[in-house]
Image (spheres, rainbow, N blue to C red):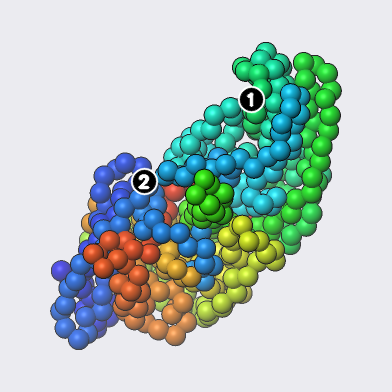
Amino acid sequence: MKFILGKVVLMLMTLTLIGPLGAGNVRAANWMDSIEGDTQSSAPAPSGSSFVSSSGSDSSSNSDSGSGGWMDKIKADNDVEVQTEVHAPEEWELFFDMDNQLFPSTIISLSTIRDPSLLGMAELDNNFGSPLAMASVYIIGRAGDEVTVEISSTKLIKPSRMTVTLPESNQAYRISPHLKYEYEKMLSIYQPYPEDITAKVYLNGEFLGEKSKTIIVRSINDCFYGQYVETADGSVFQPWPEMFVAYVNEGHPVVDQILAEALKKGYVDSFSGYQGNQQDVVNQVHAIWRVLKDRGIKYSSITTTSVESDKIAAQHVRMVGDSIEGSQANCVDGSVLMASVFRKLGLDAYLVLLPGHMMVGASVDSEGSSALFLETTMLSGSSMNDAMRSADETIDKYRAPDGGAGDVTYINVSGSRSVGILPLREID
């Protein structure tokens, strides 16, 4: 099947993706510039969770382009060992996950998730409270002991309490109150700083003690995308690529401005999403490309965060408004920007994660039978046809020889939203 973009003929290429939230198989496709002839080839058949289709390979590379989750994000068959020092009855320790670092972007984007199993998180034995909690108390007591834990911090966590009754003696239990975060304050954190976390423990109504530790609060622009955890087989990297979806912000006012500019310049007659045919969708994406190119968005390779860690993988990601205002974007910035506009149009958007890199894609029909992919770093000086050809070549480079996903991870933005990953709101 051919589609016309300007004077260039585009060819359809198909690949299979796992559909969002059990919706069945979604077929996506690249659009290939076929100036040199009408050639067609097959793309990979990646498999994965309901909203992330991945190769399953572990890569800690930053993406110009992710622990395992926290202590209890047990994916696949990894048996994560809890690293705490609790030995005798009535002994307890305060534990803060993610290498004693707090990522505001992660806290906010996961704040409304009520079923952590949708993120691949398994329940731990001897666990009370939220598996998404960053701060926990580990305690050994006696059967029937009533334990109350209160956790707070200097600025970001209001006093948060939980009371449980221990079912068995001489067992280490993890108690994680639902933490009452100051979300509005987190949105305006642009530089890292130290914060003190304090836990108070009461045993059978009597005050048992208080302990504190200092953590590092990261910038809202620091995107956590993976963590090394200790297992019985050694250190294992567990990726969280879906965290990049937090920076896709379809509700930002600049998205409407981009669409209005495309209409005003006559790049497209209307934005109708999937109401037309596949060619109509391609034309709408092309109109968006032209507007961003007109605005002079240039490639910027800035990805470094202000805090270094040998256990946590994180990357600096610009907010959508910052990319437009500063007229610069790295591959992740450009991908989340374009995905934001695609989402506003009602298109199924994909972030395509590769080793050290990211691209963007969108289904070109409502059934998800095909999709186009774009190399956003080419936005300033190349045609959309060239960007599609480059994206196709890059995916071919990293997919497996047998046609599988290989080192390509497809992140379905709609599926991520469905499980509860929120967009980050920008503070004016």
**C-alpha distance separating marks 1 and 2:** 36 Å
Q: Can you say which quadrant of the picture contains the C terminus?
A: bottom right
Q: Can you say which quadrant of the picture contains the N terminus?
A: bottom left
Q: Is residue 403 visible?
A: yes
Q: Residue at left 80%, top 16%?
A: 205
Identity, as a three-letter code, of the amino acid under mark 2: Ser
Horizontal placement of 168 versus 192: left or right?
A: left
Q: Which residue is mark 1?
A: 171
Horizontal placement of 334 versus 89: left or right?
A: left
The image quadrant that residue 352 belongs to is bottom left
The image quadrant that residue 160 belongs to is top right
Dot 1 or dot 2: first in sequence order is 2
* Number of callouts: 2
Q: Is residue 368 visible?
A: no
Closer to the observer: label 1 or label 2?
A: 1
Q: Residue at left 59%, top 64%?
A: 315
Q: Which residue is mark 2?
A: 50
Q: Nearer the viewer, residue 229 or 251?
A: 229
Q: Give percent across and percent down for residue 258.
A: 48, 67
Identity, as a three-letter code, of the amino acid under mark 1: Gln
**Rendered view: 98 above or below 177:** below
Q: Nearer the viewer, residue 42 or 231?
A: 231
Q: Secondary structure at mark 2?
A: loop
